[in-house]
Image: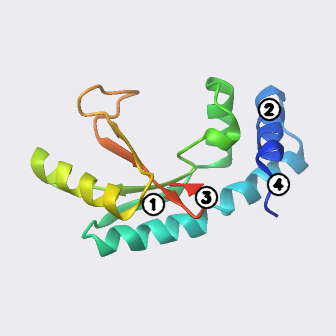
Amino acid sequence: MTLSKTQVDKLGERLRKADVPSDEDLRLLSGFREERRAAMDAATSGLSEIGGTVQARRLKTINSIVDKLRRESARLSQVQDIAGLRIVSHLTRTEQDRIVERIEAHFPGAKVFDRRVAPSHGYRAVHVVVPVDSQLV
C-alpha cells in the first residue's frame, strides 16, 4: 500500500484539518505507519552490530501522529519519529559521542540533534535520525 510523497502529504493535511478523521484516512495512516516497522527492525539490527543495545522501540501511535500534525507545521512525509529506538545506558559524555559517531558511520545520511546542549520539549539526549530503505528512524 505504498503511497507517493504527494499522497502522504495530502493525507497529512486531511488529518490535520479534520475534526474527526475519516475511517479511510485512519486506515491509510495505519498502513503508512506500519511500513516503518521493517526500517525499525533493520535499524535495531544495525545498532546491535555496532554495539548499541536497544532498550525500547516503538511506532508512534495513530493519535500521537495526528496530534503532532495538528501541533506542528511539518508535512506528514517530514515526520521523523514515526519509528523510534532508544538506547539507555550509563555512559560518559565521551562514550555517548563515540556511539553517535559509530551510528553516523553505519547509517550514511544520519542527522544528529544534540539535545544535551539545548534541551527541547524536555528531551536532553542525543537524537540521531537515520535513513533506512527510504524510511526515517
Other-residue count near label 2 (Cα within 10 Å), few / some / many at <14 / 14–19 / ≥20: some
Q: Position of residue 19 (x, y in %)?
A: 83, 27
- N-terminal label among 2 and 3: 2
Give the CA separation, mark 4 to mark 3. 21 Å
- N-terminal label among 3 and 1: 1
Q: Position of residue 67 (x, y in %)?
A: 65, 33
Name the one closer to the observer, 36 or 123: 36
Of the residues shown, which amino acid type is indicated by label 1? Arg
Q: Secondary structure at mark 2?
A: helix
Q: Residue at x 32, y 60 (%)?
A: 105
Of the residues shown, which amino acid type is indicated by label 4? Arg
The answer to whether the residues at label 2 and label 4 have Cβ atoms under 8 Å apart is: no
The answer to whether the residues at label 1 and label 4 have Cβ atoms under 8 Å apart is: no
- N-terminal label among 2 and 4: 2
Give the CA separation, mark 1 to mark 4. 22 Å
Q: Residue at x 31, y 75 (%)?
A: 49
Name the side, left or right, on which 48 lies relative to 22. left
Quarter of the figure with residue 11: top right
Name the side, left or right, on which 124 lies relative to 16. left
The answer to whether the residues at label 3 and label 1 have Cβ atoms under 8 Å apart is: no
Of the residues shown, which amino acid type is indicated by label 3? Ser
Q: Position of residue 112 (x, y in %)?
A: 36, 42
Quarter of the figure with residue 64: top right
Residue indicated by mark 1: 57
Residue indicated by mark 4: 27
Please tell me whether mark 2 or mark 3 is closer to you in this view.
3
Residue indicated by mark 2: 13
Residue indicated by mark 3: 134
